[in-house]
C-alpha cells in the first residue's frame, strides 16, 4: 500500500510543488494501461537461460553501461558503442 510508504525521493512537478502520493498514483494508473515492455515468453526464456548458466551449461556476457541516461539511449549512440 503506497499510503504507508515514505516518499524519500520526490521530484518537483511543473508548478514547483512536491507531487508526492497523488503524482505516484497518477503515474502508476497510466503505466497500468500500457502494454508490458517485455512479453511473458521472453521473461520465461531468460529465466531458463539463466538457470542453464547457473548449472554451468551456458555462460553470460553482459555489455553496456551500468547507468545510461534516457537522453543517451538513441540509435546512433548505441550503434557506436557496439562497434
Image (cartoon, grey):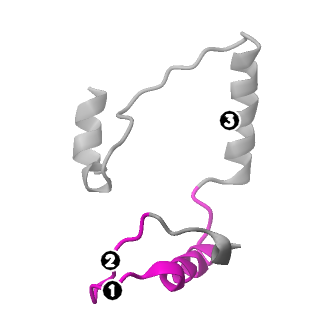
Q: What kind of element bears circle 3?
A: helix
Q: Quadrant of the N terminus?
A: bottom right
Q: Residue at x 66, y 73 (%)?
A: 4
State if disc 2 and disc 1 touch (CB < 8 Å). Answer: yes
Left or right: 35, with 40 as reference point? left
Query: Which mark is on residue 25?
Result: none
Query: Which mark is on residue 17?
Result: 1
The residue indicated by pointer 2 is: 12
Q: Which quarter of the figure has residue 17?
A: bottom left
- Residue 74 position within the rendered picture, expressed as x and y whole percent measured from the top left: 28, 51
Residue sitting nearer the eye, 58 or 6: 6
Residue sitting nearer the eye, 58 or 66: 66
> Which residue, as the protein is rendered here, is positioned at the far top?
56
- Badge 3: few (under 14), some or many (20 or more) residues near its Cα, within 10 Å? few
- Badge 1: few (under 14), some or many (20 or more) residues near its Cα, within 10 Å? few
Q: Residue at x 36, y 41 (%)?
A: 67
Which of labels 3 and 1 is toward the front?
1
Residue sitting nearer the eye, 74 or 66: 66
Q: Earlier in the sequence, mark 1 or mark 2?
A: 2
Which of labels 2 and 3 is toward the front?
2
The residue indicated by pointer 3 is: 46
Amino acid at each position: 500500500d503506497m499510503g504507508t510508504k515514505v516518499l524519500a525521493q520526490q521530484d518537483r512537478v511543473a508548478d514547483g510543488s512536491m507531487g508526492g502520493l497523488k503524482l505516484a498514483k497518477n503515474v502508476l494508473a497510466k503505466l497500468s494501461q500500457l502494454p508490458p515492455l517485455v512479453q511473458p515468453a521472453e521473461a520465461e526464456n531468460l529465466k531458463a537461460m539463466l538457470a542453464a548458466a547457473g548449472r554451468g551449461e551456458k555462460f553470460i556476457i553482459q555489455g553496456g553501461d551500468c547507468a545510461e541516461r534516457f537522453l543517451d539511449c538513441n540509435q546512433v549512440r548505441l550503434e557506436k558503442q557496439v562497434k
